[in-house]
Amino acid sequence: MTQLPPPSVGGDGAEDVPVAAFDDAHLQPYAKHPRRAEIVVGACLFVGFLGFVAYGATYWVGGQTQVEAVTLGLGFFGFGFAMSAWGKYLMPKGPFTEDRHPVEGTEPEVQALAAAVSERGKMVFRRRGVLGGLLGLAGAAMGVVLAFPLLRSLGPQPMKALDTTDWKPGAYLVDINARRITVDDLEVGGALTVFPEGFVGSAIDQTMLIRPSSVNIVTKPGRETWGPQGYLAYSKVCTHAGCPVGLYMEQTQQLLCPCHQSLFDVLDGAQQVFGPAPRPLPQLPLYIDSLGYLRAQAPYDQPIGPGFWERS
Amino acid sequence: MSSTTTPPPGPPAGSVPGVPSADGKQKKLDPVDAGVKWLDQRLGIAKGGRTFLDKIFPDHWSFLLGEIALYSFVILILTGIYLSLFYNPSTATVVYHGAYAPLRGVRMSAAYASTVNLSFAVRSGLVIRQMHHWAADVFVGSIAVHMARIFFTGAYRKPRELNWIVGVTLLMLAIVNGFIGYSLPDDLVSGTGIRLAFSFVLSIPLVGSYLAFFVFGGNYPGNGDIIPRFFILHVVVLPLVILGLIAAHLGLLVRQKHTQFPGHGRTEKNVVGTPMYPAFIAKTTGYLFMITGVLWAMGGLLQINPIWQYGPYEPYKISYAVQPDWYMGWLDGALRIMPSWEFVGFGHTIPFEVFLPAIIFPGVTFTLFYAWPFIEAKLTGDRAVHHLLVRPRDRPLITALGAGMLAFYFTLFSASSTDVLANFFQISLNSVLWFFRFAVIFVPIIVFFVAWRMCIDLSLSGAGKRKRANIVTRSATGEYAITKSDRRPGDGHEELDPELVPTFIEVPDTVGMGETVGVRRIPRRV
């Protein structure tokens, strides 16, 4: 490219205006055969056009997901490809350059700014130390009280909510249809999700009822009466991260949490045997009343679900 | 040639805009001239605008990775606005009576019902919903790959540390908003994800239970508050923050100008490539439409998140082999392989088995990302300004470190499918888990050394530096001589020396395109 004497149309500061001759190599298209590139661009634009029209027609007659995808996708792609190819192959190929000017100022400029910030700041705060302190105090108070509506209003305090469930002594076990469970409901090897009566579907009360056997099961010392006629009930909320421990594997008598694969031994008080869960699933002590209904002897003896700070 | 003192002779003078012609009449300006003039008198755009149009974009393909992220975000905004016209962020129970027969009569939340409806009852709705989901996956993916490019080529070094920080923040927000977004349909799988989020917050010592109760409006599953809250975060708060940060990202890019790979005519003091207008605008707008086309086609052809198969969320239900979107995989993997180290004592519990992988680990990860440019400057003592990029092989240790990091996160990501792998290969879940517990330590170390060795070998071998061809010539007397060619094999286009973008193009009168000097537009084709 030839640097010709600058034209003076621009007046002042026009000395370094770059000028190119019309036949400068930088201004020629990148394509070796521009005619072919034009044909490709034109063809792509036509494909784009067809794609758009075909999508419109598809939509008009009622739509079909895959056809919509192909037609409009092709429309967009042809349209875009043509535009990019036009820019790459038919516009001046360059390469062009621009100078990179350092962003930083001179040393005196930097010092002047720094001095202005610190000197003026000192003038404001050194002379009015008390006011500065009060400003800080009021600002801090503002920050604290704004957290009340921003955070505290959003929900209740936990209080004892994490420590308790809705299981009460004598609560009937019901299934998801609120039907009371009787001693004949589960075959040996069966499993069912149960809730305390009146709390069907509750997230914290969900309990796995399993019947590994037809005779009384003692899972841990001190739990001699908790598994009448082979019925065992464990909290279904994983002690790891709270997923429902939904997979009962009858052959190995284990419960598996599908989220992170914690494994619990059903016959050993749902002791965790593998995976990230830190604790056994809490067991619900059961009894069978005179009418044959399954009921809870007592609530869970510990908080259910994942760990938290206040859990002792 | 015209000059300021003597009006140019002859009729062509009229084509110099704004200059009174010889008879003293003000010629009518052409509309573009008039518009530019109008704006310039009010905003002073002439000088800066011209610089902006001349802004140079380097031509290397790897600079397009960030553009994928930018354009996926554009698509996310547009498809997201469309979806919000149909989506109902409410957990109120409704009974479904819509187009999808298997769910008719099922009780579900209004959020879930509206998502199923917009998939089946709105024409093109399913394509747009799936396109939104794919665009989110591509958004995070392209950010990650773009970030790897920035890392391995050293583009984050001084003076670009601030833009690295903005970029890391964008990655974090993209992941967070992606998670919140796929929670909104309130289907069985995403509902499980929300349950996990509650447990993560709950695991924080001292304040965890309070925070969790405040965010969810009560003990899990809350009062039906979480879906509307997530909705506002997902469609207003986080997009605005992301938008602002993208503006800052690009603003810094314009202010500091692009980096570039070393090469013909490329120095620390210039940028070589394609000017913004018209070539780059054409190429990049075309790119936007190509990405739109691909994502649209994916939205209709590749099923993603078929929530009607999962069913509505019920807290007591769970699906097997559930996995989060890919960008949550590293956290899910960390949760799975973490040993059960719960601390109990002094009347308190710290559930490290959740707190470490779900809270501390991502916190440390992003802190390291943020601090990396400063750590590196400290370690290498390199505080110089860098505008030229490096080849990864030229910094073996840093490249190996980056490769090891990637291997670490990829191993964790793979660990998020322990159950699927165990089923697929018919091996015990325990073996898979233990394999990953070791792999997460050893795979990165192995990858580190392999990458390090490869960098050194590549540097030594000079691979990639193409040799010039030998030209064998025979003289008239039959002697053979070997000379070196100027070109290297594979050189497609001989690259010219870079030049400034011309302000004026000289076109001789004989070509018939007007005046000799002062034609202001670059002709497309001469």
Image (spheres, coloured by chain):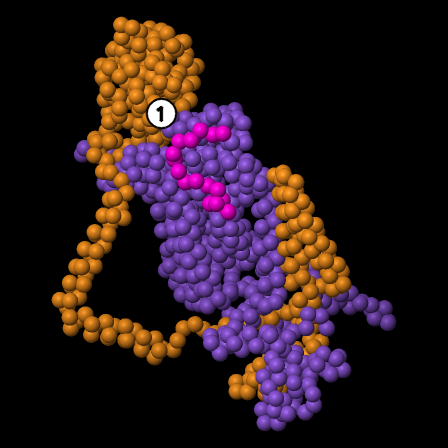
Chain colours: A orange, B purple
**Quadrant (top left/top right/bottom left/bottom right) for the C terminus of chain B:** bottom right
What residue is drawn where x is 51% and y is 36%? Answer: B117
Residue type beneath disc 1: Gly
| Label 1: which secondary element | loop
Q: Please give the range of residues in magenta.
A: B82-97
In the rendered image of this protein, does residue B490 appear above or below residue A205? below
The picture places residue B35, in percent across and down from the top left corner, at: 55, 74
Which residue shows up at 47% across the image and 62% down it? B250
Question: Which image quadrant: the N terminus of chain B?
Answer: bottom right
| Residue hosting label 1 | A201
What residue is at 73 percent from the left and 60 percent from the top?
Answer: A37
Total numbered labels: 1
Residue B405 visible in rendering = yes
Determine the residue positioned at 65% across, 79% down: B519
Query: Front-most of B112 and A249?
Result: B112
Image x and y of residue A206, in percent: 34, 23
Q: Position of residue B285 (x, y in %)?
A: 59, 59
- Determine crowd level at label 1: few under 14, some 14-19, many 20+ residues with C-alpha closer than 10 A: many
* Residue A281 seen in the figure: no
